[in-house]
Image: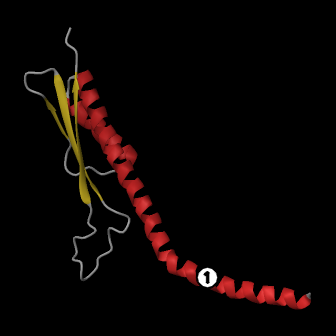
């Protein structure tokens, strides 16, 4: 009986070494998938924040009938989300309609935005713009 126990321990130690090797081979792929999910979540948050800022700015501009108040609402909403706008948000009254249109653009930079690879070029991870345009009408009585 003790020999059977020793054989079983020897097999399990050899098997645990194999498990470690398999884990180390699959770890880079697991990390890449995990980082991709995190970046996709960050990009979705960024898009939703830009969309909400544009909608709130258009709604505020329509309620107060003032582009400057709408622009202030957009900038405040982006600051709350921690997103710097690219340029000034455009808030305009739509001609011949009772509506305001807001266009917001912000540059999304990935977590590894500062990483530069010599063979890939310097503009690989500099980010990309996310834009959203909202239109809100107001009632005239």
Can the viewer see residue 108? yes
Picture quadrant of residue 138: top left
- Residue 78 is situated, as x and y percent measured from the top left of the image, at 33, 44
Say which of 16 and 45 sits in front.
16
* Residue sitting at x 24%, y 59%: 128
- Residue 93 is situated, as x and y percent measured from the top left of the image, at 14, 28
127 sits to left or right of 34: left
Quadrant occupied by the N terminus? bottom right
Quadrant occupied by the C terminus? top left
129 sits to left or right of 34: left
Rendered view: 94 above or below 85: above
Q: How is the image coloured?
A: secondary structure
The residue beneath circle 1 is 20
Picture quadrant of residue 136: top left
Rendered view: 101 above or below 10: above
Q: Residues within 10 Å of mark 1 (few under 14, many from 20)?
A: few
Residue lying at the far left of the rendered structure: 96
Tally of marks: 1
23 sits to left or right of 12: left
Can the viewer see residue 82? no
* Residue sitting at x 18%, y 28%: 100
Say which of 80 and 24 sits in front.
24
Rendered view: 14 above or below 136: below
* Residue sitting at x 22%, y 15%: 139
Residue lying at the far right of the rendered structure: 1
Q: Which secondary structure lies at badge 1?
A: helix
- Residue 17 is situated, as x and y percent measured from the top left of the image, at 65, 86
- Residue 60 is situated, as x and y percent measured from the top left of the image, at 28, 28
């Amino acid at each position: 009986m003790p020999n059977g126990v020793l054989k079983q321990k020897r097999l399990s130690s050899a098997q645990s070494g194999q498990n470690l090797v398999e884990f180390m081979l699959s770890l880079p792929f697991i990390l890449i998938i995990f980082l991709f999910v995190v970046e996709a979540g960050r990009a979705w948050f960024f898009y939703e924040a830009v969309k909400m800022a544009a909608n709130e700015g258009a709604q505020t501009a329509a309620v107060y009938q003032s582009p400057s108040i709408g622009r202030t609402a957009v900038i405040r909403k982006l600051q709350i989300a921690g997103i710097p706008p690219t340029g000034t948000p455009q808030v305009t009254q739509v001609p011949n309609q009772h509506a305001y249109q807001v266009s917001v653009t912000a540059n999304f930079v990935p977590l590894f935005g500062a990483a530069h690879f010599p063979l890939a070029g310097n503009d690989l991870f500099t980010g990309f713009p996310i834009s959203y345009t909202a239109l809100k009408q107001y009632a005239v009585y």
